[in-house]
């Protein structure tokens, strides 16, 4: 049913577009009748419409009173009497009737309910229109909505909508590292820098009308780099448009043929057009992913790998001395049998303490030339030709430090005590390093090859960390020792003299540069079977 709302001065009424004899139409407007006023009496006073309708005709035909609001305690109830087959209309205040009840037939009751439901529907629609024009939603930066105006003919209805969701966490701090290295200037001993850490998970969705959409996703915790940032701008055409779809940003390509494979993690431009029954898809993009083929045989996975020669596993694997490095090929030429005659029986590995654990810590002074006979950084140390292998007696370094520089035992006076050695080209930070409260590594933190004489640290060392060792081994039935063990110097406040394998000064010109093994590579794989490994 279509109803036309006609508004006149001081009144409005509903005018039906057709006549149904089963429903009583509303009364026509009267020129001398105002809202809620029926007529004027002889004295010129208005006759008010009764608040309580006495009959069905008054309820369905007459205009109800509008001058006063019916009190809330006045209730009109409708009861159905099955014996009579009619509806009884009662007007009550509480439990007392204030009007004469009258009966309605089922047809009359249905007509009244239809008229009332229609009136409530149009009142609700009119209220929504008025509310939409008068009330404005508060401005929200994360959820914005703008009207397009004349541009709706191009992009369609809906306006511009922008919605942002997600979370952003930013932590900032300052780190300051101080290295008491006498070889460095005072300004270079302390390094202060800012430390920022951020965690962002944000989604931005925008629409322009019902045709253009924009989406952006930023996630710093994504597993892959190409998943951390996703940007997509899409335009969707109508059913009768030639251009069906245009996408820019992170797009995907799917094909219905097994001969031409689709691509993933694509960044570029994609368009879909339709010419009658012909559909054409064009794509120009850059692929940010890589596909690999995995072969399995007997339940095991086989994967091809390629590694450059300079991509060795650095700062983890070290020879214990030049004696083991120079004889490595000779000792390992008959693998799996190692013909070295060496068996390392005891070892202590010391590193710079950055963990804050001081349970097994000692002050150490590591010397580069300790235990060396042929490869020496300084000519000041005299080699002993009686010892061809590495040991404390291979040169006079340890004996000279003990006798001529006794103050080097005190970690606070190491720099001053060994300062005279600078005249012979022996400098701190290069030829020797002092480490206060160095940490003793547990046996689970490194792997020792007792016959070939090298160790592998489980965690790679940083450039500013020092690595030093003291070990004991047997060679051709004789026992040799390099460095001092913690049990040799019982006083914990005195420094230990140990063999330095890595210093804070990284230079290929120093002899200990060759102690770092550069023939160990990481495949990035686990549980590799030795029998199925092939190297070309």
Image (cartoon, rainbow, N blue to C red):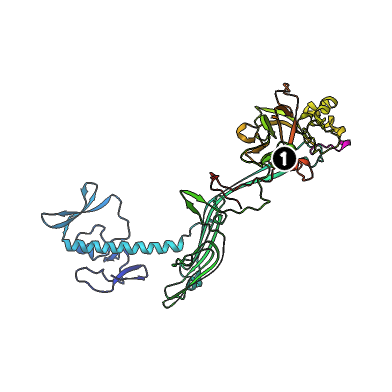
Could you tell me residue 164's position as x and y percent? 52, 56
Of residue 92 and residue 473, the one placed in the foreground of this image is 473
| Quadrant housing residue 334 | top right
Report whether residue 36 is seen. Answer: no
Furthest toward the top, the residue is: 490
Residue 49 visible to the viewer: yes
- Near-viewer residue (271 or 436): 436
Q: Label 1 crowding class (10 Å Cα cut-off): few <14, some 14-19, many 20+?
A: many
Tell me the quarter of the picture where residue 376 sits.
Answer: top right
Residue found farthest to the left: 83
Residue shown at the point (77%, 33%) measured from the top left = 371
Foreground of the two, 512 or 60: 512
The residue that appears at 32% across and 56% down in the rendered structure is 69
- Residue on which disc 1 sits: 325
Residue 215 is left or right of residue 123, and the answer is: right
Q: Is residue 219 above or below residue 415?
A: below
Q: Position of residue 294 (x, y in %)?
A: 50, 54
Residue drawn 21% across and 62% down?
110
Residue nearest the observer in this picture, 134 or 428: 428
- Above or below: residue 151 compared with residue 161: below
Span shown in magenta: 422-430
Which part of the image, by quadrant, shows the N terminus? bottom left
The number of numbered discs placed on residues in the rendered structure image is 1
Q: Locate residue 363: give its quadrant.
A: top right
Classified by dominant secondary structure, the portion drawn in magenta counts as loop
Answer above or below: position of 255 versus 76: below
Q: Residue furthest right?
A: 423
Q: Position of residue 271 (x, y in %)?
A: 50, 70
Q: Is residue 55 left or right of residue 368?
A: left
SS for callout 1: helix
Is 233 covered by the magenta stretch?
no
Which x, y percent locates residue 464?
Answer: 72, 40
């Amino acid at each position: 049913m279509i109803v036309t709302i006609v508004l006149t001065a001081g009144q409005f009424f509903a005018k039906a577009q057709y006549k149904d004899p089963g429903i009583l139409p509303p009364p026509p407007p009267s020129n001398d009748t105002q809202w809620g006023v029926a007529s004027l009496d002889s004295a010129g006073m208005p006759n008010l419409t009764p608040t309580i309708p006495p009959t069905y005709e008054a309820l369905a035909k007459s205009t109800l009173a509008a001058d006063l609001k019916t009190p809330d305690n006045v209730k009109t109830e409708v009861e159905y009497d099955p014996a009579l087959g009619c509806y009884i209309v009662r007007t009550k205040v509480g439990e007392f009737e204030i009007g004469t009840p009258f009966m309605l037939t089922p047809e009359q009751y249905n007509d009244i309910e239809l008229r009332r439901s229609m009136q409530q529907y149009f009142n609700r629609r009119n209220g929504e229109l008025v509310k939409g024009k008068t009330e404005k939603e508060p401005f929200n930066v994360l959820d914005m909505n703008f009207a397009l105006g004349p541009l709706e003919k191009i992009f369609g209805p809906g306006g511009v909508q922008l919605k942002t969701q997600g979370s952003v966490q930013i932590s900032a701090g300052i780190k300051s590292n101080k290295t008491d290295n006498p070889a460095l200037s005072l300004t270079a001993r302390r390094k202060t820098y800012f430390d920022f850490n951020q965690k962002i998970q944000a989604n931005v969705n925008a629409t322009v009308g019902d045709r253009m959409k924009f989406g952006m996703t930023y996630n710093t915790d994504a597993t892959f780099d190409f998943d951390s940032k996703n940007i997509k701008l899409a335009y969707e055409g109508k059913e009768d448009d030639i251009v069906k779809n245009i996408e820019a940003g992170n797009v995907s390509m799917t094909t219905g043929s097994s001969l031409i494979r689709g691509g993933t993690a694509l960044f570029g431009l994609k368009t879909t057009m339709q010419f009658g029954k012909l559909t054409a898809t064009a794509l120009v993009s850059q692929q940010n992913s890589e596909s690999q083929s995995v072969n399995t045989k007997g339940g095991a996975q086989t994967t091809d790998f390629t590694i450059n020669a300079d991509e060795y596993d650095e700062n983890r694997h070290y020879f214990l001395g030049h004696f083991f490095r120079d004889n490595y090929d000779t000792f390992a030429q008959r693998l799996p049998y190692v013909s070295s005659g060496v068996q390392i029986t005891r070892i202590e590995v010391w590193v710079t303490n950055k963990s804050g654990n001081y349970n097994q810590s000692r002050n150490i002074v590591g010397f580069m030339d300790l235990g060396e006979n042929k490869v020496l950084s300084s000519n000041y140390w005299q080699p002993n030709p009686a010892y061809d292998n590495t040991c404390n007696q291979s040169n006079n370094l340890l004996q000279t430090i003990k006798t001529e520089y006794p103050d080097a035992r005190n970690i606070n006076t190491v720099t001053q005590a060994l300062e005279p050695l600078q005249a012979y080209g022996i400098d701190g930070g290069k030829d020797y390093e002092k480490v206060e409260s160095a940490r003793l590594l547990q046996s689970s933190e490194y792997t020792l090859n007792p016959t070939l004489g090298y160790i592998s640290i489980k965690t790679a060392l940083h450039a500013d960390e020092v690595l030093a060792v003291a070990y004991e081994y047997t060679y051709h039935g004789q026992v040799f020792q390099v460095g001092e063990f913690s049990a040799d110097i019982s006083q914990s406040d005195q420094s230990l003299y140990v063999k330095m394998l890595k210093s804070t000064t990284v230079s290929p010109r120093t002899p200990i540069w060759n102690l770092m093994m550069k023939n160990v590579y990481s495949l990035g794989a686990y549980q590799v079977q030795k029998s199925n490994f092939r190297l070309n």
